[in-house]
Image (tube, rainbow, N blue to C red):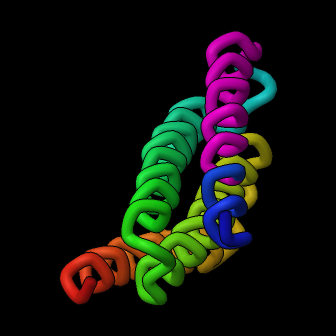
């Protein structure tokens, strides 16, 4: 199995695992561990993380069946990067109350780009 496929499938599984762990923490931690409105922000980050973990899983499976098509591979790598940047920034803000400027929007833009690359890659294959 090509390295990029192993990477994406492994990251999908780890992102889902960490999403479940984060969900348990967010559900059970006392309010003082969160910034104002932080629990809801963390829940949104968990939701985005879990959806994109499934997206990475789907891309990895698609690449195994259709071969490693360049745009689909690029979409997977962009999705992995965007998920880490976006969710990481939202988690950070949820727990600290400190906004990291354009970090979360940059991660979100990379996520949008990854879905566009996936669509174009699938159409072209």
From the viewer's perspective, is residue 23 above or below residue 62? above
Front residue of this view, candidates 87 and 67: 67
Residue at the (46%, 67%) spot, across then down: 63
Front residue of this view, candidates 113 and 104: 113
From the viewer's perspective, is residue 123 above or below residue 57? below
Percent x, y of residue 7: 71, 62
**Is 22 included in the stretch rendered in magenta?**
yes
Percent x, y of residue 14: 72, 42
Residue at the (69%, 47%) spot, across then down: 91
The answer to whether residue 89 shows anywhere in this view is yes
Query: Chief secondary structure of the magenta span?
Result: helix
In which quadrant is the C terminus drawn? bottom left
Percent x, y of residue 12: 61, 48
From the viewer's perspective, is residue 80 above or below residue 31? below
Relative horizontal placement of residue 53, taking residue 1 as reference (left or right): left
**Is 25 included in the stretch rendered in magenta?**
yes
- Residues in magenta, as a range: 11-30
The answer to whether residue 37 shows anywhere in this view is no
Percent x, y of residue 83: 58, 61
Relative horizontal placement of residue 1, taking residue 46 as reference (left or right): right
Residue at the (38%, 70%) spot, across then down: 66
Front residue of this view, candidates 93 and 83: 83
In which quadrant is the N terminus drawn? bottom right
């Amino acid at each position: 199995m090509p390295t990029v496929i192993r990477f994406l499938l492994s990251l999908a599984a780890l992102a889902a695992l960490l999403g479940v762990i984060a969900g348990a923490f967010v559900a059970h931690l006392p309010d003082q561990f969160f910034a104002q409105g932080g629990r809801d922000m963390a829940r949104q980050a968990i939701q985005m993380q879990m959806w994109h973990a499934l997206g990475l899983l789907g891309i990895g499976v698609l690449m195994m069946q259709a071969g490693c098509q360049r745009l689909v591979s690029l979409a997977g790598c962009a999705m992995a990067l965007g998920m880490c940047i976006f969710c990481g920034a939202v988690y950070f803000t949820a727990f600290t109350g400190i906004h990291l400027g354009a970090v979360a929007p940059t991660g979100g833009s990379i996520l949008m780009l990854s879905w566009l690359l996936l669509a174009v890659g699938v159409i072209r294959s």
